[in-house]
Image (cartoon, helix red, strand yellow):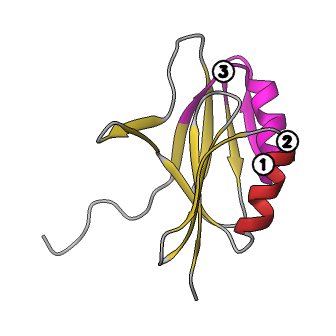
């Protein structure tokens, strides 16, 4: 196949328990910007300076955007940062659950859980 059918990742979707509370948390704590919201349809779009949009879906169902590998819970969302240590300290300050924080040789990896039970990852690659 010479031409790819898919050209880019447009957006990612994750479940949230309360749309407004989640928007506020992601904007104030993770630096996202709200780019669109439909309370009627229970979803919102958030953006960062780069990369695909993050779509939040408000649901009452018990679900999260994580998966298991060899008995270990893994994040679906992994973001780059140039301030991993400061970000770690900030997450501790706001009492976010940090599940992993380690120099893996190729860079520092940080995993934490948001207010909806979704696991997030941040990585600072060695330069």
Determine the CA span between mark 1 and mark 2: 5 Å
Q: Position of residue 23 (x, y in %)?
A: 78, 35
**Residue to which mark 2 is pinned:** 94
Q: Position of residue 95 (x, y in %)?
A: 81, 38
> CA gap, disc 1 to disc 3?
27 Å
Crowd class of label 2 (few under 14; some 14 to 19; many from 20; radius 10 Å): few
Q: Position of residue 41 (x, y in %)?
A: 64, 20
Foreground of the two, 34 or 88? 88
Q: Secondary structure at mark 1?
A: helix
Contact (CB < 8 A) between labels 1 and 2? yes
- Mark positioned earlier in the residue sequence (2 or 3): 3
**Horizontally, is 117 left or right of 34 in the view?**
left
Q: Which residue is mark 1?
A: 91
**Residue 42 tag number:** 3
**Quarter occupied by residue 116:** top right
Q: Are marks 1 and 3 in contact (CB under 8 Å)?
A: no
**Mark number, residue 49:** none
Residue 45 falls within the magenta-colored stretch: no
Residue at 46% of width from left, 36% of height from top? 66
Over which residues does the magenta segment extend? Answer: 14-43
Left or right of 5 on screen, residue 57: right
SS for dot 2: loop
Label 1 packing within 10 angstroms: few (<14), some (14-19), many (20+) = some
**Residue at the farthest left position:** 1
């Amino acid at each position: 196949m010479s031409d790819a059918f898919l050209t880019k990742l447009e957006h990612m979707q994750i479940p949230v328990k309360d749309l407004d509370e989640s928007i506020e948390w992601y904007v104030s704590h993770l630096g996202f910007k709200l780019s669109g919201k439909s309370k009627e349809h229970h979803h919102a779009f958030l953006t960062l300076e780069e990369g695909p949009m993050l779509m939040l879906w408000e649901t009452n169902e018990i679900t999260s955007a994580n998966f298991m590998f060899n008995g270990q819970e893994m994040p679906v969302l992994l973001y780059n940062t140039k301030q991993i240590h400061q970000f770690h300290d900030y997450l501790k300050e706001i009492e976010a659950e940090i599940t992993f924080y380690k120099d893996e040789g190729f860079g520092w990896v940080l995993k934490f859980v948001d207010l909806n039970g979704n696991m997030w990852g941040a990585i600072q690659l060695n330069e």
